[in-house]
Image (cartoon, rainbow, N blue to C red):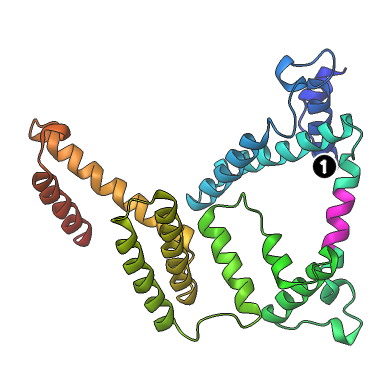
Amino acid sequence: MDFEKLRKDSTDTGEAFERLVEIIRYLRSEDGCPWDKVQTHESLKKCLIEESYEVIDAIDKKDKDSLEEELGDLILQGVFHGLIAEDDKNFDLTSVLNRVSNKMIFRHPHVFLREIAENRAETLDNALIKWENMKHQEKRQKSQTQVMVDIPRQLPALMRSYKIQKKARDVGFDWDNVKEAFAKVKEETVELEEICSAGDHEHILEEVGDLLFSVVNVARFLDIDPEEALTFTSDKFVRRFEYIEKNAALRNKELTSMTLEEMDRLWEEAKDEEKNT
């Protein structure tokens, strides 16, 4: 193995990709790394999820340097999985790349077959309709239920429920307006309150799910991404809690020794401070 060649940066995209492939291939070889050699699709699932979220974090922070690094880590995961499949003689990286290229061409008839009048899409909405139609053909989805089933269960629950609701809306199964969606939230809240006194954990779980699903419906009607909304509120909670903790320390108090009323007063101070900034 020419290690000196592997250490040199490439100036061509194809060569850079092949360099990464050769590095991972060698790491998984007999003379490679003990850890890399034993990895499987299953053992790398957590890494794949973490790298995906680190890319999103870099995007949200508008950190271009971090985004460059994290995209590399995410691409590495794709290469790693491709080489594992190659070692198992299931498929290889060439077939992976050809398959995704063919998919992009197939799902964009409005671009690659635009000479045919019926394929043309002059607006964003038309392009999305063409994409979805070609996706249904490609996946041989014969029912809207199958479209819903094909939404991965491994997605964050809020994101998955949002997507399921959109697929139901596509065939007309939806509330007429956001007021009806709000009414459903109120109905589910009452049902949850009523069932809590029974102490039936399984039924409570179901009702909590119903309430969350209804809230997602409201978010969808308001064109709000529920994942983003909940992330925003979680960040806000952490900021305000930090204010409580810092101000408690300034008063030489431990949080565990403070009353809820004392902490609530600091919480309100944090809210006021945010309004004034």
In front of the other: 113 or 223: 223
Task: Report x, y in % for residue 148.
Answer: 67, 65
Q: Judge from the rendering whether residue 66 lies leftward or rightward of residue 203; answer left or right.
A: right
Q: In the picture shown, does residue 169 fall above or below 105? A: below
Quadrant placement of the C terminus? bottom left
Mark 1 belongs to which amino acid? Asp
Q: Which residue shows up at 36% across the image and 73% down it?
A: 187
Task: Report x, y in % for residue 246.
Answer: 18, 38
Q: Judge from the rendering whether residue 190 lies leftward or rightward of residue 207; answer left or right.
A: left
Majority secondary structure in the magenta region: helix
Q: Which residue shows up at 59% across the image and 52% down it?
A: 155
Q: Mark 1 highlights which residue?
A: 12
In front of the other: 92 or 7: 92
Q: Is residue 202 magenta?
A: no
Task: Report x, y in % for residue 115.
Answer: 91, 81
In front of the other: 153 or 116: 153
Q: Judge from the rendering whether residue 149 lies leftward or rightward of residue 65; answer left or right.
A: right
Q: Which residues are magenta?
A: 97-104
To which quarter of the image does residue 262 belong?
top left
